[in-house]
Image (cartoon, rainbow, N blue to C red):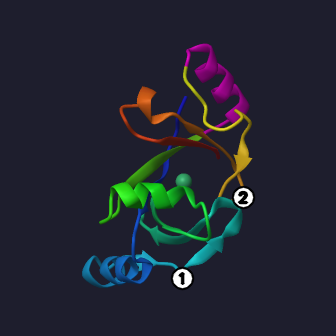
């Protein structure tokens, strides 16, 4: 059912430092920061040949990233995102198998303008897992 790895998201306490490290030390192609007020994050994209890394930094009050950084002050891997062909078909299959979908179970428009869902980490090897309709 899942296709390509779309991205791995890393929560970072300092976007400028994270950008400098990936651009300088690792020699990667790194975007400028982009605010996503609807998601409570500022995002930076690291473009790799086969996938992307996304840095997530809290934006505004009640950012979903803040609690994660409170627990992981140095930052850390926040979620992985896999592509699916049809997000409704994927959701219904997962629900039928007892997986929990976060939120109200309806896909939301994610940071790339495409429908996404998040699966509860408890059922997926302790890893928050995002599905994005490709
Ligand atoms: Co994501």
Residue sitting at 56 percent across and 14 percent down? Answer: 97
Residue sitting at 56 percent across and 16 percent down? Answer: 98
| Disc sitting over residue 63 in the figure | none
Q: Which residues are magenta?
A: 84-98
Residue 110 or residue 123, whichever sits in front: 123
Residue 50 in sight here: no
Quadrant location of residue 13? bottom left
Q: Magenta segment: does it hold 99?
A: no
Q: SS at mark 2?
A: loop
| Residue with the mark numbered 1 | 32
| Residue with the mark numbered 2 | 113
Residue 91 or residue 3, whichever sits in front: 91
Provide residue 114's location: percent of width, then percent of height.
71, 52
Q: CA distance from mark 2 to mark 1?
A: 18 Å
Q: SS at mark 1?
A: loop
Majority SS type along the magenta span: helix
Q: Is residue 3 left or right of residue 17?
A: right
Residue 129 in sight here: yes
Provide residue 32's location: percent of width, then percent of height.
54, 82
């Amino acid at each position: 059912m899942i296709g390509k790895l779309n991205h791995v998201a890393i929560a970072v306490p300092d976007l400028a430092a994270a950008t400098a490290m990936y651009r300088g030390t690792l020699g990667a192609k790194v975007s400028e920061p982009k605010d996503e007020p609807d998601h409570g994050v500022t995002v930076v994209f690291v473009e790799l040949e086969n996938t992307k890394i996304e840095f997530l930094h809290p934006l505004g009050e009640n950012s979903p990233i803040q609690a994660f950084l409170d627990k992981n002050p140095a930052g850390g891997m926040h979620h992985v995102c896999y592509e699916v062909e049809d997000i409704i078909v994927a959701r219904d299959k997962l629900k039928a198998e007892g997986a929990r979908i976060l939120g109200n179970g309806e896909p939301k428009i994610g940071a790339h303008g495409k429908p996404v869902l998040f699966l509860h980490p408890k059922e997926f090897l302790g890893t928050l897992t995002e599905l994005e309709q490709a």
